Image (spheres, helix red, strand yellow):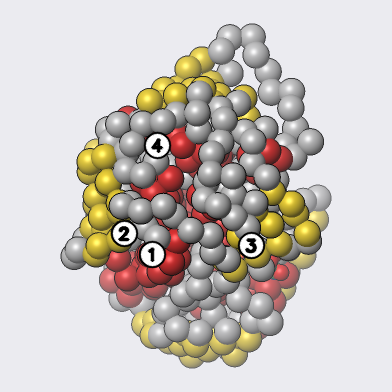
Amino acid sequence: MDKFVIKGGNRLTGDIYVSGAKNAAVAIIPAVILSDEPCVLENVPKISDVSIGLKILAEMGASVNMIDDTTFRIDATNLVNSEVPYEMARKMRASYYFLGACLGKFGKAMVSMPGGCPLGDRPIDMHLKSFEVLGSKNDIINGVVNVECDHLYGGHIYFDKVSVGATMNAILASVKADGLTIIENAAREPHIVDLANFLNSMGADIMGAGTDVIKVRGVKHLRGTTYSIVPDQIEAGTYMIAAAATHGDVMIRNVIPKHLESITAKLIKIGVNVEEYDDAVRVWTTRPLVKTNVKTSPHPGFPTDMQPQIATLLTLVDGPSLVTETIWDSRFAYVEELRRMGANITIDGKVAIIEGTGKLNGAPVKACDLRAGAALIIAGLAADGITEIEDIHHIERGYQDMDGKLRGIGADIEKRYFPGESSIKTCGA
Ligand code: EPZ
């Protein structure tokens, strides 16, 4: 089994470069299906969720050519198959974007119920509701979601809850529908805007992405395009917190500072210095950090995908701090792992009460999901002693070369293979 082995205590200093956004790339890759011509995608993150998406496209008959590590030419114009291979689709959450893309292109799609991080209940009712508004008939048979319609007509979609995935899928399904689609209570994340920008670069007519009302006027034809994926807001935030946790001084490059505003504001409140440049942020500390409270909420609020990371930082400052998770039912599985490192955290429903002890001790721990794994890396970097993290495939789903990038700014971290070891611990046990 592969593990990350970290010797804590090094201050992180220097320049680290952020890759393209996972949560944009996993939607834009299926969206290529909607194009009537080949597309070139640049700044594609080299992560396993992207590899799965590209493999699914190839399985469906698209030609996928790697131009370089992060650039791909994709020709999905000869795609006739609107079925996504079951075993591949269930490996990740974002496979459900193939539903919206194939429905928008072919008027039908068959995709297994999605997989993804175990964060509690993750229904797709709002995705299906948006397809129904556009005229689709949906059912789920043997774990496979079937959507089909003779003709897609624009409609008025209102989401009871803010949903990134459902907003993305509503855009994908409506971009070639007849007439106007209005999406209300839409998610506003940067990756939603990136999907809309990608589709508009192909000739789509999408207005209002990034606000809570998105209007999509259906078009008949979508031409090919060359498009560069937006920088990853959550990867950037993760490295900002790693710099703060090690009292380092790090320039995080290839970012859009505006996307980081809620993270920056929270770090400044904790006593971290943050300076913004055109496409970079500098993060460093000059004084003891102080406790604060954090509540996750949809963009532009504090991202839920940064919750495990900020909670880890707060274990290192004198508490108590409160972290409230409002998006997911159970996103605190990493807490048990932090307790193995000496953290003093009590969970009360959706609230983690963190009695910051100012330090952590290295220990063998397990990555329960993508962002929990990133949080454990931050913990290991700041801890006294050695931390071994297992199940690091979760981390490699969403972070390109995280250990290599961190070594580049002084971290003592390496990926090591442990033959014969199998994962026995269960998360949060
Ligand atoms: C996306 O998940 C991200 N994943 C998640 O990031 C992120 O945590 C989440 O958005 C919130 O920002 C991808 O983009 C691939 P939602 P998604 O639909 O789309 C409920 C990471 O670490 N809901 O915005 O699945 C849902 O249960 C991952 O990169 C319904 O009830 O999230 C949740 O409580 C983890 N019905 C809330 O809405 C639905 O049909 C928000 O979920 C859909 C969602």
- Say which quadrant the N terminus sits in: top right
Q: Marks 2 and 1: in contact by CB < 8 Å?
A: yes
Discs 2, 3 touching: Cβ within 8 Å: no
Please say if the residues under marks 2 and 4 sit with CB atoms less than 8 Å apart: no
- Specify the farthest residue to the left: 278
What is the crowding at mark 4: few (fewer than 14 residues within 10 Å), some, or many (at least 20)?
some
Task: Please name which of the two marks, 2 or 4, marks the residue nearer to the observer.
Answer: 2
Q: Is residue 38 left or right of residue 242?
A: left
Question: 341 or 91, which lies in front?
Answer: 341
In this picture, is 183 found above or below 315? below
Mark linked to residue 322: 3
Numbered tag placed on residue 24 in the rendering: none
Q: Amino acid at mark 4?
A: Met
Q: Which residue is mark 1?
A: 268
Q: Which mark is residue 402?
A: 4
Q: Amino acid at mark 1?
A: Ile
Structural distance between the alpha carbons of marks 3 and 1: 17 Å
Q: Which residue is mark 2?
A: 273
Residue 39 in the image: x percent, y percent?
30, 56
Across and down, in percent, residue 109 comes to 61, 60
Kind of residue indicated by mark 3: Leu
Q: Earlier in the sequence, mark 1 or mark 2?
A: 1
